[in-house]
Amino acid sequence: MKEIISIGIGQFGIRTTEDMFKEFTDDHSIDTQGVRRANENPENNQVDFPHIFFEETEDSKYRPRAFFLDTDCQAIDNVRSGHFGKLFTIDSYTCGKQSAAGNWAKAYYGENSELI
């Protein structure tokens, strides 16, 4: 079976990845805690493969296959404290010490260069 890992880099990438997983949780009937709900529409014969975008843990919860990376922790903290914050694991986040303020060269050559 195929598995897809989503990577959100920077503020836009993080927001886009979070929004994408909001849609995936609706599509696969997974709540904000990672618990899969019963099929709400039994007449829907569409094949459902949540394992493509989600990993099932030992306690039968689904965790997104996603990784967030940013030089500034603000966008990542917004995901952590948001409605879907408990859906992602702590290993899904990596952030630097200071913002690059949208300047690629500052991030690549500056203090947070070890992230890249």
Image (tube, rainbow, N blue to C red):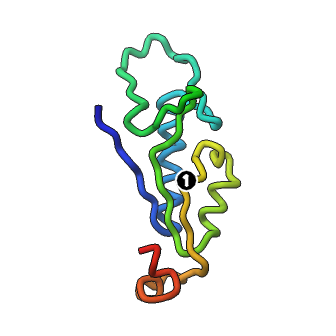
Residue 24 vertical placement versus 79 (above, below): above
What residue appears at the point 68 percent right and 52 percent down from the top-left corner?
Answer: 82
Give the x, y percent position of residue 60.
Answer: 56, 26
What residue appears at the point 55 percent right and 53 percent down from the top-left corner?
Answer: 91
Find numbered disc 1 in the image and state the secondary structure of the residue it sits on. helix
Left/right placement of residue 37 relative to residue 108 reads: right
Q: How many marks?
A: 1
Residue that extends furthest to the top in the rendered view of this protein: 43
Give the x, y percent position of residue 4.
Answer: 35, 44
What residue appears at the point 38 percent right and 27 percent down from the top-left corner?
Answer: 49
Residue type beneath disc 1: Asp
Q: Considering depth in this image, is 41 or 83 the residue closer to the camera? A: 83
Q: Quadrant of the N terminus?
A: top left
Residue 69 vertical placement versus 57 (above, below): below
Residue 103 vertical placement versus 56 (above, below): below
Residue that extends furthest to the front in the rendered view of this protein: 58
Residue 27 vertical placement versus 69 (above, below): above
Give the x, y percent position of residue 89.
Answer: 58, 47
Residue that extends furthest to the right in the rendered view of this protein: 81
The residue carrying pointer 1 sits among few (fewer than 14), some (14 to 19) or many (20 or more) residues within 10 Å by Cα, namely: few
| Residue 34 falls in image quadrant | top right
Q: Considering depth in this image, is 84 or 57 the residue closer to the camera? A: 57
Q: Which residue bears the numbered disc 1?
A: 91
Q: Considering depth in this image, is 99 or 94 the residue closer to the camera? A: 94
What residue appears at the point 63 percent right and 45 percent down from the top-left corner?
Answer: 84
Q: Quadrant of the C terminus?
A: bottom left
Give the x, y percent position of residue 33.
Answer: 64, 36
